Amino acid sequence: MNKKILMIYTGGTIGMVPSPQGYIPSSRALYEQLEAIPDFRHPAMPDYEVVEFHPLLDSSNMTVQEWNKIGQVVADRYDEFDGFVVLHGTDTMAYSASALSFMLEHLSKPVVFTGAQIPLCEIRSDGRDNIINSMLIASSGVVREVCLYFNGKLLRGNRSTKRSSDQLAAFESPNAPILAEAGITIRYRERALRQPEEGPFRFQPFDELPIGVIKVFPGIQFSLFESIMTESLRGVVLETFGAGNIPSGRDSLLPIIQKAYQHGTIIAVCSQCPQGSVTLGTYETSKALHDIGAVNGRDMTTEAAVTKLYYLFSKGHSKEAIQSLMSRDLRGELFETEL
Ligand code: ASP
């Protein structure tokens, strides 16, 4: 029997059409384009059904509610389909793929995010190849995790990050191997793929929570952040230099972080370097962060760290459990190395 794929169309460039205000998502355009592609009727293609978001979104407008909506659709239709393809804008696709990787517990079916840099309605669109390959991957029976397919490469969703606003190779996963490559055949790197965790599939929606990101830069005036680091801030991802370093001079972040930690705010330390890991304690400028209770985000992307905070808080874990789980590998989002 033919495999069945549920395509979840959330919006994004792939189905957009030109308008006087610039490109806007269009329901009609996607269906018309899919109809016009004979490959979709090729016997090698799986059967598919499309569900569509109302309204369709430019992914810059995605919120926690839309992550929950995608997760809920997968959960509601989980038993009916062999795999899921999420058509999504590229701008925040890595956030949504990371969010879904945490929300969908004990996932044993593929959820493949894809989209396009050029709309399907335009000549040279990359959307056609991206959808066809994503459908074939989602129906292959090989992959059982949340991933992102773009420009010939399959990446782990929570390891991916958007690297280019104008190249067709828009995504990379600098700290994790490519899961598959689409050349003449689709070649899977079996050893890089995750095995499903034991246990029944479960969907954990996210609560809307005050989570922040602070990117440090030379000369940053940390006192500006004092007013937002209150008890109501649940978690902060600190994008530091190199292996976890922050400026330690006159206007230091440390007392502000210390106060936030005492309030119960979780501070996760990630790096501005796309490749490599945070190792708190290599330098004096990072050891102090460790000493006041900041968590080592290791080699997580900011996208993964932000959505993991949402996940762990939404699960109702204690502060101590979240501190520890942020540095642990839950879905292949980080590589655990001990200091
Ligand atoms: N602004 C668009 C979006 O993220 C860009 C894209 O899809 O490539 O929805």
Image (tube, helix red, strand yellow):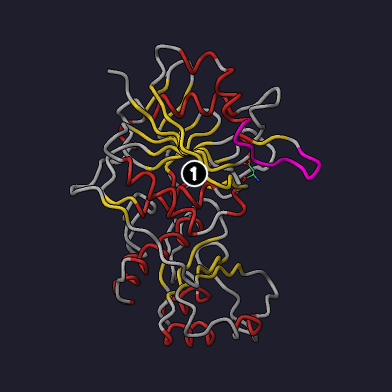
Give the residue type that dot 1 points to: Ser
Label 1: state its secondary structure.
loop
Can you say whether 299 is above or below 287 in the image? above
Q: Which residue is situated farthest in the left direction here?
A: 199
Q: Which residue does the numbered mark 1 point to in the structure image?
A: 173
What's the magenta region?
19-28
Query: Image quadrant for the C terminus?
Result: bottom left
Q: Nearer the viewer, residue 94 or 85?
A: 85
Q: x and y percent of residue 250 in the render? A: 65, 86
* Residue located 31% across and 29% down the image: 142
Can you say whether 312 is above or below 32 in the image? below
Query: Image quadrant for the N terminus?
Result: top left
* Residue located 68% across and 23% down the image: 124
Q: Which quadrant of the figure has residue 136?
A: top left
* Residue located 56% across and 17% down the image: 37
Pointer 1 local density, CA inside 10 Å: few below 14, some 14–19, many at least 20: many
Q: x and y percent of residue 161 in the render? A: 54, 47
